Amino acid sequence: ESAGPTIAAGEILVEIMATDRGMGFLEPQALIGPYPSGAPAIFIDQVARLGGGAGIIGCVGRDDFGTINLERLRRDGVDVSAVAVSDRYPTGSAFVRYRPDGGRDFVYNIAESAAGRISLTEEARRLADGAGHLHVMGSALSISGLKEIIAYAARAVRARGGSTSFDPNVRKELIDGADGAQFSRLVDDADLLLPSGDELLAAAGVDDEGQAVKALIARGVGEIVLKRGAAGSTRFGADGSRIDCAGFLVEEVDPTGAGDCFGATYLTCRRKGMEPAKALFYANAAGARNVTRRGPMEGIAGFDVLDAFIAGTARAA
Ligand code: ATP
Ligand code: MG
């Protein structure tokens, strides 16, 4: 495992959420926010909170929404030297409302916001040149400038003997901007793949979990960690091994960000040399604790808080 920080690239957003459940945003309603957000930002903030080196390539506007993001990332120890500040475009945003059935509807402003203006700047190159791991978020693939950044960063990280991970989360609202060939390449190249639910089947193009795992390992994926929401998670190794981890029993207040916290925790524990079973256990704890707080980054926790959470929380049988 190569030294150097874990880096991510993509959307840095504020999230503003409806305070009650319902269908979308078709009438006036109570909202709460802004909360710092964006899948790559949530992920990298969790890496930093666990004491892992962390940096992000992104772009915010010169506005309060940008400031709350930069302040949070900086406070938690993320290198934000490669976050550009746009004078022209406002910081990206996501409005979210939870449906009665637990589903979610989003209104995104990403492509035409500062978040959509990311490019391979001098600072981005510098961050990538020193990195030991690159994490790619499927949600970021609809940003046009990201392709060049990922290509450059993946090459730089590989050249230093580093590794990559890929979370194939592509929201239904953003799927049109995605590029199928790029998506497949990211899957093939991933040392660690972090799908949730049916994303595993979609990534493999088959409809059986066991076959999907076999197919992806055959394509060169190093390990697969499948997120199962309240039911916990499963880790599949390239050697055919399987570890299941039951979910912690918590009251879900806000599910957004759980997958990002989970993935960041698994990766950071592995980069610190932890065995897969222990890393998976911590990742389950990080995901579960995150859903107990409103706001995607408000439940992010370091090892001290996670240890206390683990000691005080039961798990499903
Ligand atoms: P998102 O994309 O919204 O961030 P995700 O779909 O990628 O999330 P989930 O499976 O929802 O990922 O959550 C990741 C992990 O967090 C789960 O594998 C589990 O360990 C934990 N987790 C999530 N929701 C709950 C819950 N309600 N109760 C307990 N643990 C949970
Ligand atoms: Mg996800």
Image: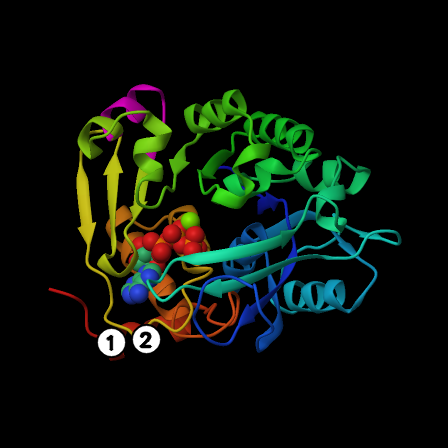
> Is residue 160 shown left or right of residue 22?
right
Q: Residue at x 61, y 37 (%)?
A: 142
**Location of residue 45 (image quadrant):** bottom right
Residue 128 image position (x, y, % from top left): 66, 37
Mark 1: amino acid:
Thr
User: Which stretch did the figure color magenta?
Assistant: 213-223
* Residue position marked by numbered label 1 in the rendering: 313
- The reply to whether residue 222 is visible in this rendering is no
Closest to the observer, 100 or 273: 100
- Residue at the (46%, 60%) spot, across then down: 257
Q: x, y percentage for residue 212?
A: 26, 28
Q: In this image, 49 relative to 246: left or right?
A: right
**Distance Cα–Cα, label 1 vs label 2:** 6 Å
Q: Quadrant of the N terminus?
A: top left
| x then y, percent, for residue 165 | 46, 38
**Does residue 137 belong to the magenta stretch?**
no
Disc 2, ligand 1: is the CB inside 8 Å? no
Left or right: 316 with respect to 20? left
Compared with residue 134, is residue 56 higher up or lower down, i.e. above or below? below
Front in this rendered view, residue 114 or 71: 114
> Which image quadrant for residue 21?
bottom left
Residue 258 in view here = yes
Q: What is the secondary structure assignment of the residue under circle 1?
A: loop
Which residue was labeled with disc 2? Answer: 309
Disc 1 and disc 2 in contact, CB within 8 angstroms? yes
The image quadrant in which ligand 1 is located: bottom left
